[in-house]
């Protein structure tokens, strides 16, 4: 794995600390990896939403509900 150094606002750093302190995550890296997985999932959902919207448009830019 690669090591990265990041700067966070105090509130975000405290949230990470709390997640580790409560045992929800094993360490700080695990919290960040979970957050990145969620962000990546959201990015993929956005990409798919845009792709479906593009497919749903007819040749004149009109919504073709039969293709959705």
Image (tube, helix red, strand yellow):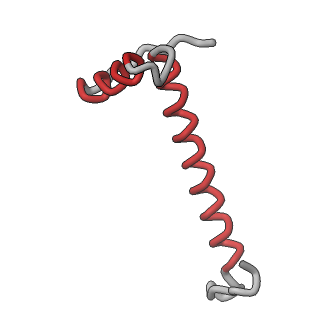
Q: Residue at x 63, y 72 (%)?
A: 53
Residue closer to the observer: 30 or 51: 30
- Determine whether, in the image, residue 40 is placed left or right of residue 24: right
As drawn, the residue found furthest toward the right would be 67
Q: Residue at x 48, y 14 (%)?
A: 27
Q: Quadrant of residue 17?
A: top left
Figure check: 34 above or below 57: above
Residue closer to the observer: 42 or 30: 30
Residue 62 placed where, x, y %? 62, 88
Residue closer to the observer: 9 or 50: 9
- Determine whether, in the image, residue 8 is placed left or right of residue 56: left
As drawn, the residue found furthest toward the front would be 22
The image quadrant where one finds the N terminus is: top right
How many marks the image carries: the answer is 0
Q: Residue at x 69, y 86 (%)?
A: 65
Residue 55 placed where, x, y %? 71, 73
Residue 8 placed where, x, y %? 31, 24
Figure check: 17 above or below 48: above
- Determine whether, in the image, residue 2 is placed left or right of residue 7: right
Q: Residue at x 68, y 78 (%)?
A: 56
Figure check: 50 above or below 10: below
- Determine whether, in the image, residue 61 is placed left or right of residue 68: left
Q: Quadrant of residue 45?
A: bottom right
The image quadrant where one finds the C terminus is: bottom right
């Amino acid at each position: 794995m690669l090591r990265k150094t990041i700067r966070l606002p105090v509130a975000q750093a405290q949230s990470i600390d709390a997640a580790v302190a409560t045992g929800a995550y094993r360490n700080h890296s695990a919290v960040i990896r979970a957050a990145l997985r969620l962000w990546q999932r959201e990015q993929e959902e956005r990409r798919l939403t845009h792709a479906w919207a593009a497919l749903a448009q007819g040749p004149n830019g009109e919504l073709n509900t039969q293709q959705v």
